Image (cartoon, coloured by chain):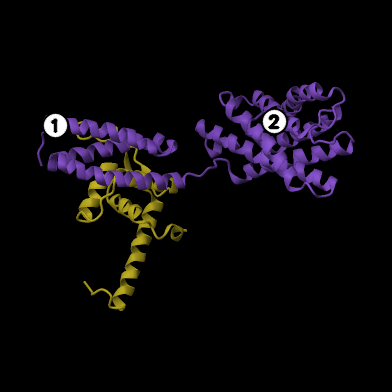
Chain colours: A yellow, B purple
Amino acid sequence: MVNEYLPLNHADFHIMLALGDEERHGYAIMLHVEELTEGAVKLGPGTLYTSIKRLLAAGMIEESGERPDPEVDDQRRRYYKLTKLGRKVLTAEVQRMERMLRHARTKRVVKHA
Amino acid sequence: MRDLMNSVEQKSLEYSIQAYRRMVRVYPKQFLGQFEEPLLQAFGDLARRALRSGGVLRLILLWMGVLRDLGVSAIREHLNVSPWICPPHVRLRWIVACMFGFGIGGILGDRLGMISVPFSGQIRSFALMVILGLFQSAWALRLSGKDVLRWTLATTIGCFALALPFRFLLNGFPPNRLSSANEMVFVALLGAGIGLLQFLVFPRNAVNAWRWIPATVSGVLGGYFASLGLVYTWSSLFRYGLVLFIGGAVLGVFTCFSLESILRSRGDTEGAIES
């Protein structure tokens, strides 16, 4: 069942990865992706929210009911988190990437870390 | 990173957000309804960060990326929007109902010996429209929650209310075969009659008469003449039946599109249609 969603597209994968450890709002996801990829991937607002829409519809992420302290952050912000399905799909995608990496190493395309 | 912005930067920020607010209208309405506010918020955050870290020049660079992002994601979103809300089996039921309604109704009308032109205004062609209405009702009317009798009566009376006076006006009584130009007007009026009366018993669509009625007119007109042209050289009974079946299917497609558009504009969901 999880395999139906694989492979994830680039933006979906990064968004789900950003939500892997904690709930984040849209702008925080953009910043996290940029930081995690050392600036190599910059999600624009359009790409971000069209992906979020798709992931919500697929049941891989959901809006978090909790709102931040108004003194800390804007209460209108929507926070997102991974669902159980989303976490399974993300894990499966990472495992798929690992397998690909292993194949690449056996072919000596990349060196061992 | 600086915390304060000078007045030029403040103005640039305001103009940028205003411009972005206008530009996001390129996204489908359905998407905007859900994400307009977060989109603007995210853009505002990005613009603020750009101004604080590199001033107006950085903002210009941000805009270059944002424009590309906006264009690409809007096109993708438009391509991803399904033209349909109704589940496939409901659409199929609707189209088949129209097809059989016209087809069987027309053939029965013909066997009753009354018509040289489909949908003729003679009294016995009443059967045609009764059956059309009946099939639409029985198979498709769960969409509106209205009962079979009202829908059937609306279809039947609608056909006669506009089309029959036109025929009488041109041919006297009983009406004979019409010239092709008059026939077109007759069929269009027939569609308008069906659409108008169906609309009146379809209260869910009370604000959408201008979509439903043109869909019925163009469906009847387009279906009738397109199919007539297609099968003009075939044997008369077979041709006649085929004309009616194809015409009904075209009517079904047109009205189904209209129904979809109505439901979409009302923000109904798939579940709401079936309930």
Q: Which quadrant of the structure image shows residue B236?
A: top right
In the rendered image, the quadrant that contains the N terminus of chain B is top left
Q: Which residue has dot 1 on it?
A: B8
Q: To which chain does the residue with label 1 belong?
A: B
Is A101 situated above or below B30? below
Up/down of B107 relative to B234, above or below: above
Which subunit holds the residue at mark 2?
A: B
Contact? badges 1 and 2 (CB < 8 Å):
no
Q: Which residue is drawn at 38% across and 49% down?
A: A83
Residue wearing tag 2? B188
Q: Do labels 1 and 2 share a chain?
A: yes
Q: Where is residue B49 in the image (x, y as percent from the top left)?
A: 18, 40
SS for tag 1? Answer: helix
Q: Mark 2 or mark 1, which is nearer the start of the sequence? A: 1
Is residue A103 found left or right of A111 in the rendered image? right
The image shows residue B196, relative to residue A59, as above or below, that is: above
Q: Where is residue B128 in the image (x, y as percent from the top left)?
A: 80, 34
Seen in the image, is A34 located left or right of residue B89? Answer: left
| Residue occupying image coordinates x 80% and y 49% | B233
